Image: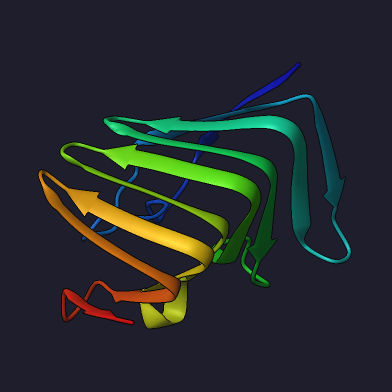
Amino acid sequence: MVRILLLLFVSIFFSYAQTKKPVVIEADALRYDKKAQTAVYEGNVTVKSDDFRLFSEKLEIFLDERGDIKKIIAVGNVRFYKGNRKGKSKRAEYYRNKNLIVLKGNAELQQDNNIIEGMRLYIIWIQKKLRL
């Protein structure tokens, strides 16, 4: 199992502000391509930070020329939890420059007893809006 401790300058999913809190990513395998500026975690991926948890079969992180995260894609039985919120989908995409999360494939978000389902859900955190 690969265990990596990263200090990220952005939070991953469901955080409203930028943070410098540590993020721990565990997976069966890790591939890093410096030229392409990508890190690919595969097999039993777990992401932990503060009260956030994400689980998937594959996690791809795309970096910009400064090494900051620009996009994250989680694929395969994606499940995540933060506080009283949780969700699941077949695929989740995070776009830092748009503060946008896109859940694709049997997407579901739940907060307390409220549930939203759809084939594709768009979450825009700056405006705290959800689009189906």
Q: Is residue 77 left or right of residue 50?
A: right
At x 40% / y 71%, what residue is drawn? 118
In which quadrant of the rendered view does residue 3 lie?
Answer: top right
Q: Is residue 117 left or right of residue 72?
A: left
Q: Residue furthest top?
A: 1
Identify the image's colour scheme: rainbow, by chain, secondary structure or one colour.
Answer: rainbow
At x 40% / y 82%, what residue is drawn? 98
> In this picture, is 43 found above or below 132?
above
Q: Where does residue 64 sit, x and y in percent of width and height?
A: 64, 71
Which one is in front, 79 or 115?
Answer: 115
Q: Is residue 8 left or right of residue 33?
A: left
Q: Where does residue 117 sit, x and y in percent of width and height?
A: 34, 65
At x 55% / y 46%, what residue is drawn? 78
In which quadrant of the rendered view does residue 99 lie?
Answer: bottom left
Q: Where does residue 97 sit, x and y in percent of width and height?
A: 44, 80
Q: Is residue 33 left or right of residue 97?
A: right
